[in-house]
Amino acid sequence: MPVLLAVALGASAVAPAGARVLLSTEEALNLAFPGCKVERGTVYLTEAQLAAARRLAGVEVRGAVVHPYAARCDGRPGGTAYFDVHRVRTLPETVMVVVAPDGEVTRIEVLSFQEPEDYLPRRGWYQQFEGERLDGDLRLKGDIRGIAGATLTARATTEAVRRVLALHRVLSAPPGGGEARREKRER
Amino acid sequence: MIVFEEKIARTARVAVVVLAVLLAAGVALPAAAQTQEERIEELERQVEELRSALEAARQPAAAGEPVGDDEAEELARRIDLLAAEIERLKIGEAAVTADRSQYGLGPAATKVYRVDQGLSIGGYGEMLYQNRSSTRDDGAVSGSKDQIDFLRAIVYFGYKFNDRWVFNSELEFEHASTGSGGEASVEFAYLDYLWRPELNARAGLLLVPMGLTNELHEPTVFLGARRPDVEQRIIPTTWRENGFGVFGDVGPVSYRSYIVNGLEAAGFSAAGLRGGRQKGAQALAEDFAWVGRVDYNGFPGLLVGGSVYLGDSGQGVTVDGEELAVGTTIYEGHVDWRWRGLQVRALAAQAELDDVVELNRLHGDTNTLGIAEEMGGWYVSAAYDVLAGRAGEMALSPYVRWEEVDTQKELPPGFTPLRSQDTESLTLGLAFQPIDNVVIKADWQDYDNAAGTGLDQWNVALGYIF
């Protein structure tokens, strides 16, 4: 078994396409939660939860395994970070979206961007997601303003934030009606 | 029960082995029917099924005490390891490393996932139908025939050699066939050296960084079935020349500063500068030019900036034994503002030329139909997506553009301006985007000019980008 796991790990080393990596996951989490304790969770969504997330997001939610990174700062909940990988044009962008305990976006960071940087919006554009909640105005041409020449990036990023907020809301729902099994480990 | 446990454990063990092999093969092998995203999704589903099976195995078959099983616990741990591994695959290189920290943080130590090569492919195209009026504003028969043209089919190729060196290019097929007046061109092809956000270098066949349309000329970006006239006659989009320079972002300000081969004045005309482009093809390099651009992006949805082009365009041409410099200055200011469904774009450009008397003598125009010392124009356009209030990509945007261009603004003493080149136009149209990548535009253009010979037309355009 260890041999096979090693094969899996080794194979993954040659697989991902080259990205322009701006931040590692660890750096992004340190930026979002300085001095806080961060727990990485693994949640296996039920069919009902997946359907609820899709309905809330209004965009595609792929994959039933979610990894929330929950932070505790000075003993209190400090927010939850999620990493979302999505296609921009033909290549992916990876972003980290940090959600406050009350469901508001507090931070967004671009970790990697594989498309030409001409399509990478400036940092100021991403900051407009801060303070956003999952509602009907969280969309391009709603609360989110577009950007000349990078519409596909703007669309993909906006959908990613909707997806993350929908998952967060589903995972924050009180138990009952198919609560996901959730296990946490110290990161 | 023990037999049952062993059976479950054996089944789970085999499943984990299969998963590990799938994880290896699913990522390492080239995509066939499934994309990598789909393969990862499938792996996630299998992890979840496996975990559910293990959960079920831990429960008593009917009533009774739950079954404890160390091996099952170990298998559960390994399943979670695989789930974590899938997460790393989804996130990719950023899971473990950063090669350019924007915040002064050191890169993570582990780089086993790092692969530095990457091919990027994209493109766009547009087809344009133009139906021109049979009569001009003065009532004369225009003689103009309607036309439908596959204007451009473009392929972008980019290649990342490593974290610092990146190649980008645009290959254009214009008017569909070289056998029927079309051409194949390299619109741009340059190498970037990416040092830091504030300072990077670029060299090759470059898009001259002026205006709103020259660098962003995809049909989904500009309003109108046809590009604005100012950005064809004063800023001769698509304007590309050979050169080198630097670019970067400093806070909310982005800049570009290039040295390029100058325009070729022998190609200028009473209609503007468009004929002076050298397009990187065996370009005369007797004269060079500097072009600089600054944009402010401080507020989401707002782009405001300007650019200047300074250089000689003589390229060694002589008149009466004297070499002409033909100093050329072009400057422009622009704004693009987006708020909810509203989009407003405006631009003003001005060009000034030296040695125009001699240049006109070269062309044989001594007192009429000459190249001007000063030419310019401006436009303002606006669109509103009436579907902006609803979710989804679909957009339906009525738009309007008012534009004035005069390529005969100021001529040397003794020259008579060609009044037909002093134009103003109103464009009214509708753009429909079923998805962000596709646009269908239809508009009507009312052209007037100082000579009274304006020719109206209506257009339908189909555009795509990927």
Image: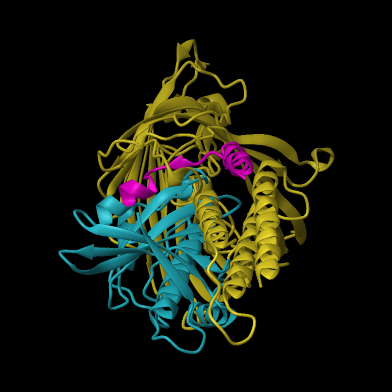
Task: Pick whichever, B363 or B348, lies toward us.
Answer: B348
Residue B53 at x, y percent in the picture: 64, 70
Q: Which residue, as the protein is rendered here, is positioned at the far top?
A: B321
In this rendering, position of residue A135 left or right of residue B272: left
User: Which chain: cyan?
Assistant: A
Farthest left residue in view: A74
Q: Total of numbered circles in the picture?
A: 0
Q: Determine whether B109 is above or below A165 in the image.
A: above
Q: Name the one closer to the observer, A175 or B388.
A: A175
Q: Quadrant of the N terminus of chain B?
A: bottom right
Q: Residue at x 70, y 61 (%)?
A: B11
Assign the C terminus of chain B to one quadrant of the image: bottom right
Vertically, is A54 above or below B445? below
Residue B212 visible somewhere in the drawing: yes
Of residues B351 and B137, which is closer to you in this image? B351
Residue B158 spot, x, y in % from top left: 58, 37
Q: Position of residue B295 (x, y in %)?
A: 32, 48
B227 on left or right of A100: right
* Region of the chain picked out in magenta, as a range: A1-28
Query: Is B317 situated above or below B218?
Result: above
Taking depth in this image into account, of A125 and B351 the one nearest to the observer is: A125
**Above or below: residue A48 compared with residue B182:** below
Q: Where is residue B435? Give x, y as percent.
A: 61, 69
User: In this orientation, does residue B450 appear?
Assistant: no
B101 magenta-colored: no
Quadrant in the rendering for residue B431? bottom right
Instruction: Specify the chain shown as yellow.
Output: B
Q: Residue at x 42, y 37 (%)?
A: B414
